[in-house]
Amino acid sequence: MTLTQLSYIVAVDKFKNFGVAAQNCGVTQPTLSMQIQKMEEEIGLILFDRSEQPIRTTKIGDILIKQAKVVLREHSKLNELISEDKDETRGEIRLGVIPTLAPYLMPLFIKSFAAANPNLKIIVEELQTAQILKKIDDTELDLGLLVTPIDHDGLISHPLFYEPFLAYVSEKSPLMRLNRIEQKELSSNDLWLLADGHCFREQSLLLCRNRKKASDMNKNIRFESGSLETLRKMVDQESGFTLLPFLATQDIKNSKRLKEFVNPAPSREVSLIHNSFFRKEKIKASLISTIQKSLPKEIPQTVTKNMDVLELPIGKI
């Protein structure tokens, strides 16, 4: 079997369609089909059940394709090691960023990172944590910017900074009269939340769970959003409060409705992650350095006694 054949079966497993897989691999469907059939005949096994639509990978096919991904990753390391030895920062880097970071962190560093690596093509996708992890597993992304710690096989993380939480409160909220908020003052029933799939949602619920007795405000409204900006608007128009990471508050940091927490303040650990096959060390070092230099001075890069770093609930990513 050849590396080309391995790349073809991985593509068919991903897209569940020979035509789409062929297009993605840059070949005709007959060429791709012929190579896969040739491989199946050579090893004496059927990798795909072609009688179903979408095409289903057989049980033995699943096992072989997982190993094919390992082989293709190891092969890709050869060129990366050669480039590292030549001190080359060229080619492309594919980065996934979670939605509660992307709009606020990306503008701080991406221009400087691109200027420092003029020969590098930078591809950025805004995705939820589970999507980033899957794409890194499938080698569709090289790196991810997300909240850690995460229990995921083969994952390596590099903590970059620790971002405090702040509360954005309605003028109708009892929290409005406070200068700083204690965690025990929070009620999950008064909290406007992000939708399922966002790790910031789970941390917000963890922070508010079993806190102060809930009030009756918004009792007949349930609204969940994929956007922190939408949640802010709901607080403006309705009542209650929402939680915001520090970087998302920079355009409203002088507002009286933005409340800091009493120390130790709830915070989240933000890391750069990749799998164990990643070898573009100079690019990674450049990215880490650029991000950390771009941060506001209020954001620490190490854990301090003034912060309460929240874990991610198990099974929620």
Image (cartoon, rainbow, N blue to C red):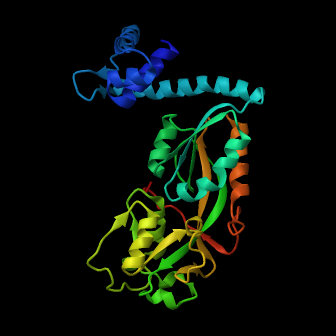
Q: Is residue 20 left or right of residue 161?
A: left
> Which residue extends farthest bottom?
177
x and y percent of residue 243 in the render? 49, 72
x and y percent of residue 111 in the render? 66, 48
Q: Which residue is drawn at 35% across and 86% down?
A: 215
* Quarter of the figure with residue 82: top right
* Quarter of the figure with residue 308: bottom right
x and y percent of residue 219 in the render? 29, 80
- Position of residue 176 relative to residue 56, above or below, is below
- Position of residue 92 relative to residue 189, above or below, is above
* Quarter that holds the C terminus: bottom left
- Position of residue 80 relative to residue 256, above or below, is above
> Which residue extends farthest left?
51
- Between 61 and 214, the one lying in front of the other is 214
* Quarter of the figure with residue 294: bottom right
Q: How many marks?
A: 0
- Between 187 and 66, the one lying in front of the other is 187
Q: Is residue 125 left or right of residue 44?
A: right
Q: Residue at x 66, y 23 (%)?
A: 78
x and y percent of residue 184 in the render? 50, 83
Q: Is residue 106 visible?
A: yes
Q: Can residue 202 be seen in this view?
A: no
